[in-house]
Image (cartoon, coloured by chain):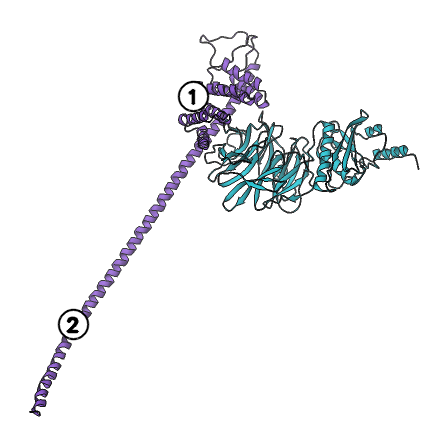
Chain colours: A cyan, B purple
Amino acid sequence: MPPRPLRTLSVLCLLALRLDAQDTIPQGVRVGLTYDPSSRPGVFVTSVAGANADTVRAMLARNLDFGDRLTVISADAGPPPVGRINYELYAKMGASALVQASVTPQGSLHVAVHDIAGKKVLNVSDFAFNGSKELSPAWRMVVHRASDEVERWITSTRGIAATRVMFVRDQRIWIVDSDGANLAPMGVGGVALSPSWHPTGRYIAYAAMADDGTHIVVRDITTGQGRRVPDQGGSNITPTFSPDGSTLVFSAGDDGTDLYAVTPFGSDAPRRVTVGRGSPTSSPSFSPDGRKIAYISGRLGHPEVYITDTDGTNAELLTESPSGDQPYRANPDWSPDGRNVAFTSQEGPNLQVMVINVRDRKIRQLTGDARNEDPSWAPDGRHVVFTSTRSGAKQLWVLDTESGRTRQLTRGAGLARMAAWSPRMEQP
Amino acid sequence: MIRRLPRLLIAPAVILTAGACFATRNDARALQSDIANLQAFAARAARADTLQAVQLRQIMNALGAVSDSLRRVSSTLQRFQGDVAMSVHGVEQQLLTIQELTGQSRRQVDALRAQIEARAAEQPPVSSVTVPASGAPSGASPASPSGAPSPGPYQLMELGRQQLARGASSAARAAFSDVLAQYPASDLAPEAQYQIALTFSSAGALVEADSVFALVADRYPASERAPEAIYKRAVALKVAGQTRQARTLLQQVIDKYPKSDSATLAAAMLRDLR
């Protein structure tokens, strides 16, 4: 038996020769070796010590990969490293950073990130599982939060692993973690549509169908208690919260619709925001500073994206079309950085997801394969979840708007649509 | 005597019986006549009834026809009314669309003009330019002290909008102020003034914003921005808790600009405040 350092070195040398040949990350996880390492620093996740080690390592690697900012180096990690880190060897593997994690007996996830070039520890932190049951959604969310912090330490941008996506399937609201795990119904009774997140992630709003019309309901997802907000009677749809959570705007009306604003937890009568004059107006989305609202209006005879000040003045057409064109535009969603609005647009026979720069009004097409619609931004302002038929039936997909890389988020029976990406989940 | 009595009784009885027989025959004749008369009358009556029934049926048919006609007329009228309503709605929608398209075109034209101005500014300066005696035409770019043409009003407006979209309120305000300073007679002046107010409100300078919105309404009462400016002032006052002043301004929007979108919003807000 050779001495331990020599044994470790030999293992790593072998690994370096077999980088492309091995992938111990579970099936379905795509790793980023095809990406430009100069723009996406290489990161190596070592084996994890402690309980559920394989799961923790796989989740960390997958989350960093799904973040699209780092190239996760795929290789058999061997045993968890002990003692001095062989920075030279990891550098040869193309790693700029090394993630070293362990599950402590005290019930927390200890994570250290090493700067390979600087040959030093970049950051260390412990993430408490707070007694949550192993492998439970709350336990998994702790690992997700650790991943997001690791991504922030390395790239200065926090990841989006600790987020969830809410959507409608079979007229019921479902929720799934951003990595596709923990798919479950929200437990909202009756037919529910157009779900939307409160900025705290604690509440959701949705349109609930009843015998006397469609109403807006705000629900506390921690207690399960719902409350119908004051609405306009008739049809009330597409609710959305303001960035500070103090206002809820929705579309209401029967013969033509308009946007109305209401206090989500108050009892004041709704305040009118738009003047559609009989045309359909819906799908509001706030700018991140809360000063403007993007929405759909049919004032031109066909649906287009408009923006207005939140008091209803200064309304202007955002998606201008060449004269004579009557495209169908819908589902605007303002990006968290405020620069872009994603929307659905009729392009030839199919719907596609587009993005318009609010400053220069330049439009960019994000999708082109099959029918794609209903975009919703992730909190990082880089990823978008949308409905696509590219796998056959309507399912949710995630797109990295910078690289164009996509991954399927939902599978199984039933059509998935009306996705809403949550804010970062600060609590389990 | 007693024997004669039956004879005496028999005689009138016979007479009576015979008489009765005679009367019955007459009566029967009369009766037959009456019956015949009755039958004739009945036949006439029956004929009359038939005639009346026919007439009644005809009347009923006529009434039915009239009713159908009325129904048709009513239906036609309703359809006509519906068509008229639809036409009016259609005309309203078309007008709205035209307004929207006009607005859209205006924005596109403004952007185009800004581009033209930018290209004109890129042209090398001509050494000898004949300046008309009346001075520069409205909208023409005045030369800067360095001799290079300064940006035109559309270019300045576009620059200001871009700066405002970036969140650079001060830079945006400078561009809009240049429009007012250099091209006070330009059609863009009301818009520039309104945008200056927006730069203040976006920077959180609400008092300054209010004063400039007031300026928009006072200086350019005929502009499209005037009702919006007053409405914005009302909203700010409402948020500040100055409900009475807010009501006054909302009523002002409704009275002065009853057909504007701001008037619709003002009416809704006024209802909520009461």
Element at label 1:
loop
Tag 2: residue type?
Asp
Q: Mark 2 points at which residue?
A: B34
Looking at numbered disc 1 in the image, what kind of residue is underneath it? Pro
Image coordinates for residue A36, horizontal then vertical, percent:
74, 29
Seen at 69% across and 42% down, the residue is A182
Q: Quadrant of residue B158?
A: top right
Q: Give the labeled residue for mark 1.
A: B221
Q: Position of residue A340 (x, y in %)?
A: 60, 29
Q: Which mark lies nearer to you, 1 or 2?
A: 1
Instruction: Determine which of the numbered discs, if any, sits on residue A287 in the image.
Output: none
Residue B229 lies, with reference to residue A103, above or below; the image says: above
Q: Are marks 1 and 2 in contact (CB under 8 Å)?
A: no
Q: Position of residue A211 (x, y in %)?
A: 51, 47
Q: Mark 2 lies on which chain?
A: B
Image quarter of the C terminus of chain B: top left
